[in-house]
Amino acid sequence: MNLIKEVICKMSFDSGDLKVFNPSREISKEITLEILIRHRDALKQARTGELKDIPVEKLKDNDRKMNQVRGLNLVLAAQREMITASRSILFFRSTKKWEKKYKEEEEREKNTFKEHDNDYNKMLEWLEFLKICEKAIIEAQKTKRIDDDFLIVRKTEDGETYELTSNFREMLDDLEESYEQIYLLMLTNKIVSAGIEEDED
């Protein structure tokens, strides 16, 4: 069964046209593309503190930094959705490749799918990474320590001043990398297309 039926939607990004593929128009338009749009907006919020329809110059500095931290949660949520939308296709394609490589039952017992180097298992590793990030944010909110915080409040003569910590910057860098790897898995499994000619398997 061919999982890729047609190009169903295009959207202009700074890097060029993004094409989304999926078995049905509804899934592609309402799920895959919307998730990518949400991730783009969430990442922008995490980088700049800018909210949709509210220019960053209209925000107070403390509000902007608070929005940046909130943006991390939105980025995490969007990447989790990217994985959820892709898992079934990755599982199907990875299983077929594994079955093709190991045809005999004895071979499959020695080289289990769970331990096999495949895209589905790689995606699950990124899912675990996102869970670790989520846990770190929750722990930072619970504890009274400063060293695990993403935003600290300093009291000055003019009032309270918010400061983003190295934890925030490091997690943002990590989430940019995780997005790249998750998106790459979606590309190589033809869930999305970069709008360039690709060699068929």
Image: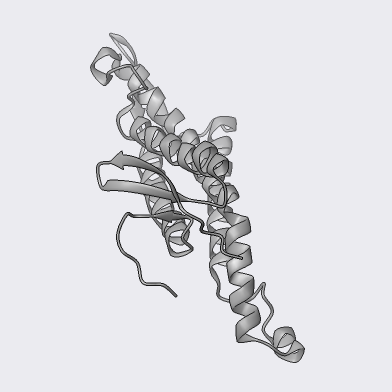
Q: Residue at x 48, y 56 (%)?
A: 191
> What is the x, y in percent for residue 164?
35, 32
Write down the quadrant of residue 11 in the picture: top left
* Residue drawn at (29%, 41%) of the image: 13
Measuring from the top left, give residue 122's x and y in whole percent. 54, 65
Q: Is residue 7 above or below residue 164?
A: below
Residue 178, image x, y percentages: 43, 53
In this picture, is 55 found above or below 93? above
In the rendered image of this protein, does residue 182 appear above or below residue 145? below
* Residue 198 at x, y percent in the picture: 34, 67
Across the whole image, how many numbered discs are drawn on residues? 0
Looking at the picture, tell me which residue is in the foreground, 69 or 79.
79
Q: Quadrant of the N terminus?
A: bottom right
Q: Residue furthest front?
A: 6
Q: Is residue 148 visible?
A: no
| Residue at the top extreme of this rendering | 158
Residue 127 showing in the rendered view: yes
Q: Residue at x 53, y 54 (%)?
A: 129
Q: Is residue 7 above or below residue 50?
A: below
Most foreground residue, 188 or 65? 188
Which of the 4 quarters of the picture holds residue 167? top left
* Left or right relative to 79: residue 97: right
Quadrant housing residue 66: top left
Query: Which color scheme did the rendering employ for the protein?
Result: one colour
For the C terminus, give its image quadrant.
Answer: bottom left
